[in-house]
Amino acid sequence: MRKVIHRKLSTNFLRLSLVFLLAFTTALSAQEGDPAKGKSLFNANCAACHKLDKKMTGPALRNVEARLADEQGLDRDWLYAWIRNSAGVIKSGDAYANKIYNEYAGAAMTAFPQLSDDDLNNILAYTSEVKEDPAPIAGAEVAGAQDAGASGGISNELILGALAILFILLAAGLYLVNKTLRRFADAQGIELPEASKRTPLWKAFVQNQFLMLVVSIFFLLASAYFVYGYFMQIGVDQGYEPVQPIHYSHKIHAGDNGIDCKYCHSSARVSKHSGIPSLNVCMNCHKSIYEYNGETTPEYSKEFYDGEIKKLYAAVGWDDAEQRYTGETQPVKWIRIHNLPDFAYFNHSQHVTVAGVECQTCHGPVEEMEVMYQHAPLTMGWCINCHRETKVDVKDNAYYEKIHEELSKKYGVDELTAAQMGGLECGKCHY
């Protein structure tokens, strides 16, 4: 009887050990893979359509393996098949595959047959990592440190208040001393000398006719100079820096991210006008870029930039949560910065495409501007001076060969400026 009991105990112990071993093996298999390598693979292959914690073109992928196992009973092999050939899984009639396909409006997922099992294990290991809390903003730490420093020491207001009280007491003391000395002089019968009456300086100045004539001429010339300067500045808006309805940082886009000016202002290459980019151009990137993760300042924080992206979404009618357009759009009333008079003709394509002039020549260091402003005066004199100094590039341009040869002989130079090729003719810019 004792032997049977021992045999049953041994059998149960072996069974429990086997179950524990299988569970441990499953846990290990779920954790296999290198998250660091998986992050690189994820950014290279998946990040265009997926985020870990946010729905985009495709679903969020944080803990995707565990979620599919718990909710749908799907294992890692199903994920392998889906990632390598999602269309094949859908065609096979898989219920969950068809559900996902229909939920995302029939958006086809790119097939990745080139990814090995190790690559997929690394990606799944990356998606299984625990979400980290966002790091505190540097600007907030600095501001907190400054506040702490200010509260720990003596404030500037307190020092200024003490100095003001000191000066008041000093003035009151001088007044009392003066009053006391006068009383003492009266008590001793001492007569204080009276100040001699003289002609005031301003009266003497007015009575001198020569000085009055000189001053009148000076004021007339000075007034004419300032009136001339005022009228010459009418229509000159250099430094004009309006606040736009949606904040757009050229420093971030053209500077930090190196986006070519002509990607947004594409018509500058072929048209008279550079054009205002449509919001669809913005959404080419911002359908995926829904938050700002670059450098911030106390004036322009992460929350500020994220709020401006939400303004863009509201204008184009983009539902970020559902990743679809709602059809409810709002016009954006951009404020024009660079504006020439109607009688002045300027062609962007002639300067950008034909002459090869850089955008910064007229618009200044755009890649450094947080808020866009008018860098150059854009006056007639400024344009003429540019024509006088800019050499015309005639290399590999048969159109200019004959005229360049004749004008070079006429002016006795090897390189012609725009002015020497007719750039100062009135009809070039006025019509």
Image: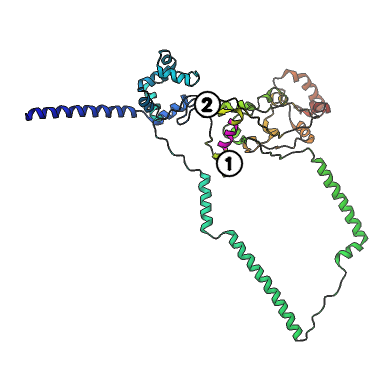
Give residue 68's position: percent from left, percent from top.
38, 25
Amino acid type shown at disc 1: Tyr
User: Is residue 363 placed above or below 167 in the rendered structure?
Assistant: above
Q: Is residue 126 left or right of residue 250?
A: left
Q: Nearer the viewer, residue 152 or 212?
A: 152
Q: Residue at x 82, y 47 (%)?
A: 226
Q: Is residue 307 magenta?
A: yes
Give residue 6's position: percent from left, percent from top.
10, 30
Pointer 2 residue: 323
User: Is residue 175 placed above or below 7 in the rendered structure?
Assistant: below
Give residue 324's position: percent from left, percent from top.
54, 25
Quadrant in the picture for the C terminus: top right
In the current view of this chain or complex, which residue is farthest to the bottom? 188
Q: Which residues are magenta?
A: 305-313
Pointer 1 residue: 300
Please name the predominant secondary structure of the magenta segment in the image. Answer: helix
Is disc 1 placed on a helix, strand or loop? loop
